[in-house]
Image: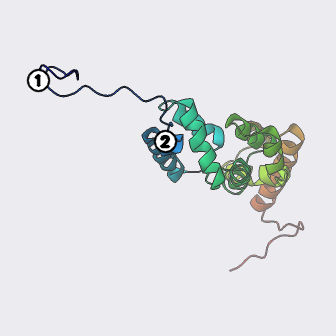
Amino acid sequence: MDPSSDTPHSKDGAPPDEPPDPSRPTPPIADTEPFRRAHASALRLLSYKPRSEAEVQARLRHRFPPDVVETVVRSLKERSLVDDAAFARAWAESRSSHRPRSAWAVKRELMSKGVDRTLAEDSVRGIDDDDGAYRAALPQARRLAEEGFDTFRRRLWGYLKRRGYSDSVSRRAIDQLWEETTRAKNGLTADGTREAEWT
């Protein structure tokens, strides 16, 4: 080593790392490696199924700093990849079509996922509890067709209450299903006349 040199060196002869220059501008978060990794992670989450903004934030916060998470979520919202209004509508429609719940129960589910109360309420306005309760209970009613009314009512009542239906809605659905079950067992049509017998 040249003794005349006043440049410090490490033990292996290489110059040490330069200290950060405070005058150099910090790159935007969106240009950093943590952002890219968090963004990729968020896209993977959304590829499995739609999620609310709060759900995405909660999953990312386990692995990434808050400022990175905030920037990623803002980017996703700008591209409509995270949209709580659309998420709430899709959730309510799916429940109504495939696994009926009361409007109250669906609203509670959405709020538990971090959806704003107003958005949740708006998304369930089109849910018809009477129709949903009937459709939800119909498969159970068919399985209970040979039971007496007390057993029929008790089991359907519990089934509908677990899905958030009110007493009055549950009562109407059970009465309608029991009437239809009785008619079917007696071979009667909806207008009370006996079905034609084929030989």
One can see residue 143 in this view: yes
Label annotation for residue 120: none
State which tag comes first along the sequence, 2 or 1.
1
Q: Spatial distance from mark 2 to mark 1, Cα to Cα?
A: 44 Å
Task: Residue at 74%, 55% (x, y): give it.
Answer: 135
Q: How many marks?
A: 2
Q: Is residue 29 above or below residue 199?
A: above
x and y, in percent, of residue 121 in the image = 83, 44
Give neighbour class at mark 1: few <14, some 14-19, many 20+ (Cα, 10 Å).
few
Which color scheme did the rendering employ for the protein? Answer: rainbow
> Taking 174 as reference, is 190 above or below it?
below
| Quadrant the N terminus occupies | top left
In the foreground, 6 or 95: 6
Point out residue 119 in the picture as x, y percentages from the top left corner.
Answer: 79, 45
Q: Position of residue 131 (x, y in %)?
A: 82, 55
State the image quarter where residue 197 is shown.
bottom right
165 relative to 141 in the view: left or right: right
**Residue at x 74% of width, y 46% of height:** 101
Give the left or right position of residue 47, taking residue 54 as reference. Answer: left
**According to the image, label 2 marks what residue?**
35
Q: Amino acid at mark 1?
A: Asp
The furthest residue to the left: 1
Q: Position of residue 195 (x, y in %)?
A: 80, 72
State the residue position of label 1: 2
Q: Which quadrant: the C terminus?
A: bottom right
